[in-house]
Image (spheres, rainbow, N blue to C red):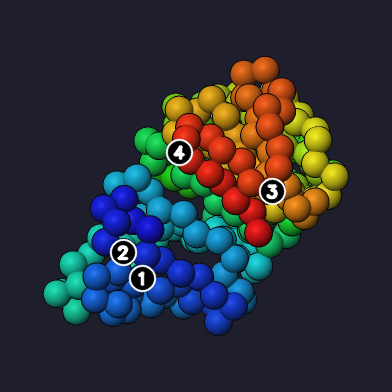
Amino acid sequence: VTPDGRRAISVSDDRTLRLWNLRSGVQERVVAEHGISVLSVAITPDGRRVVSGSADLALRVWDISTPLEAGFRNASQERVLMGHKGGVQSIAVSPDGKRAVSASGDRTLRVWNLQSGALEWVLTGHESFVTSVAITPDGTRAISAAYDRTLRVWNLLNGVQEQVLIGHKDGIRSVVVTADGKRAISASGDRTLRIWDLQSGVQERMGASLKIDGKYLTKK
């Protein structure tokens, strides 16, 4: 969903990205440049660019800011980012919009400079398919999840792995970071959610239904 909450972007096995107007339900743009299934997408904080990842091993950066009234139905492709040896499963963009972190089936994460297209870091350490990545609100760290049952915390300023969070009994499917940047929440094939303190690396809570800051999180 775009930062203004007005549009959503979907990705599909049909090789397309589609931009939808959430008020009218109308499809505003369609992009079809990836060679095979599109697996992941992230939107920059200013809502002007989209980064997509595919089973074709590429990330593509798109400009979606061109006025629709100009008759331009597609999006302008700014660049293609290559380097992964497996499908790009998840993408996160830093809060300042300058970096993207991609997670792949090749067991690595890659940190990209979105302004230049340069590869800044290759993050290695996971022993299996990396499924998900999230960035802290200050943009300094990334948290990744993988089928090796671990979460890993990475310093985006120097590419160093800071912590390995262990506790899940099955592959981890997804990870998010809380708005204050203090905790991560992971969801796993072991049918649990777990909340982690990112300063200490300690697991705070686990369960199929968890309460955080007065609100319930539920994994079905």
Mark 1 crowd level (few <14, some 14–19, many ≥20, 10 Å Cα): many
* Residue 19 picture quarter: bottom left
Residue indicated by mark 2: 7
Task: Give percent across and percent down for residue 33.
Answer: 49, 74
Residue indicated by mark 3: 208
Task: Give percent across and percent down for residue 92.
Answer: 52, 46
Q: CA distance from mark 3 to mark 1?
A: 33 Å
Residue indicated by mark 1: 19
Question: Which of the image's four quarters has the C terminus?
Answer: bottom right
Q: What kind of residue is marked 1?
A: Leu
**Along the line of sight, the residue nearer the viewer: 171 or 79:** 171
Q: CA distance from mark 1 to mark 2?
A: 7 Å
Q: Is residue 163 left or right of residue 47?
A: right
Q: What kind of residue is marked 4?
A: Ser
Secondary structure at numbered mark 2: strand
Closer to the eye: label 3 or 1: 3
Q: Earlier in the sequence, mark 2 or mark 3?
A: 2
Q: CA distance from mark 2 to mark 4?
A: 20 Å
Q: What kind of residue is marked 2?
A: Arg
Picture residue at 30% right of the left edge, 69% below the top: 22
Q: What kind of residue is marked 3?
A: Ala
The tag on residue 94 is 4
* Residue 105 picture quarter: bottom right
Residue 112 appears in the picture as rendered = no
Q: Tell me if residue 76 comes above or below residue 207 in the rendering.
A: below
Picture residue at 48% right of the left edge, 32% below the top: 213
**Along the line of sight, the residue nearer the viewer: 77 or 208:** 208
